[in-house]
Amino acid sequence: MKLHITNGRVIDPLSNLDSHLDVFIEDEKIVAIGEHNDDFYADEIIDASGLIVCPGLVDLCARLREPGQEHTATIDSETRAAAKGGITSLCVPPNTAPIIDSPAVVELIEDRAKKAGRTMVYTIGALTQKLEGELLSEMMALKEAGCIGISNGLSPIKNSLVLRRAMEYAATLDFTLFINAADPWLQAQGCIHEGMVSARLGLGGIPEAAETIAVSRDLLLIEQTGVRAHFHNLSTAKAIEIIQDAQQRGLNVTADVSAHHLHLSEHDIGNYDSLSHVMPPLRSTRDRDQLQQGLRDGIIGAICSNHQPLDNDAKQGPFAQTRPGISGLETLLPLTMKLVDDGEISLKQAIANLTSNPAQILNIDAGQLKIGGAADICIINPAAHNECHPQQFVSAGKNSPFAGWLFNHQVSHTLFNGKLVYQQS
């Protein structure tokens, strides 16, 4: 299949490219980027006039619910949603059922993702067996099976000695350690940020220190063991300061933030709106503003969806008893571009935070447009305007607090390995 994308504004942050050029694709690869070439005989021409042509998006954290929770969502349904969102590479955390602590589970996920054929699905292996925080997993076997990194998911490791040994093992394998920082004792049974809103609603609060103390402990062990580490879904201003200090001291640490934490705060919970129940919790408006500043300063290198599709029952009932999570694959791009529309970050930085930066964190050959590279491409219509209707999501999860929000910048086409996997109707 030979494709010709013509008349588009090609933006590739990694190569500092921003120009109106054509992209030529053959045998799943980009064979040329340049001026219009009448000698290239394409099977299909995509007219990208007025559109942005950029690398396919790379999402560092998306739960697909398969294996184990197929009644909620499947790899097939969620990769369809990813394609609609312009995502061509995504990472699955280890807390599937069974947990990703054996090569067999890795192979199962990769096989089903390959059959779906819409996006590259990378697995993050379990740091400890069954995520119980006691016995180290067979990291070597997980790496050989194809895991892109290692993590204990949302299950904190309480024993610092176990965490130290795990970091040392991961460092010897040159594995990236993905961390969701939370002190289990301070977090306890909380479900909302500890502050004025939690007091008004009478809900158990999670203090800022639940994140900052965990980040501080982990950084001290990272410095001692030399492991390469990435912090998932930071939510507090103080954590950003601590990460910045560690980066300035030369520690090999990176961080991301979820798209919803860049727009929402504790006040969006209103009167017990369970659709805004997430972990880590939505913090204060100051925290939200400092997360945006962390993006501008480059302390935070990537924006992820932290996609967690849930069925309707999971969001019914008293707030504290509902399950946390937002279905985020289809709002990742619009929420990021809303930051551009609001003047918070530049267009180039927004695209970098969704493409080349997360790809570099993963150390994968993605997130860029280069000759000879895979033709994973997202084409964006910056003039599209639409209202968010979660019930129309392709994802099986309709749980989103963004119903009624007006978005610009919609995906018009997604190409994965040179194949058109989504086209806006």
Image: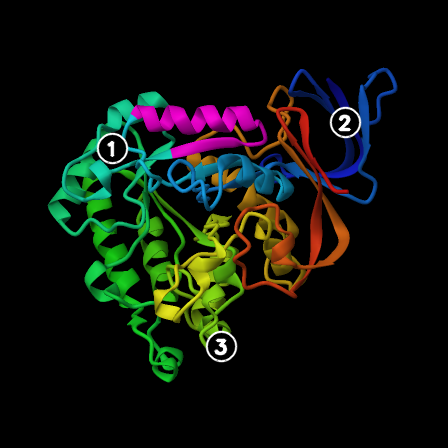
Task: List x then y, in percent, for residue 244.
Answer: 37, 55
Type of amino acid under label 3: Gly
- 304 lies left or right of 252: right
Give the residue displayed 60% in from the left and 23% down from the top.
373
Identified at 46% across, 53% down, the residue is 310
Residue 162: quarter of image? top left
Q: Which residue is mark 2?
A: 34
Which tag is nearer the camera, tag 1 or tag 3?
Answer: 3
Inter-mark Cα distance, 1 to 3:
44 Å
Residue 95 makes an appearance in the image: yes
Q: Nearer the viewer, mark 3 or mark 2?
A: 3
- In reply to whether residue 110 is colored magenta, the answer given is yes
User: What quarter of the picture does the N terminus occupy?
Assistant: top right
Q: Position of residue 213 (x, y in %)?
A: 24, 61
Residue position marked by numbered label 3 in the rendering: 270
Tell me whether circle 1 and circle 2 mark residues in contact (CB < 8 Å): no
Q: Which mark is residue 171?
A: 1
Please state the extent of the stretch shown in magenta in the rendering. 103-123
Compared to residue 403, the image places residue 411 above or below, namely above
Label number found at residue 413: none
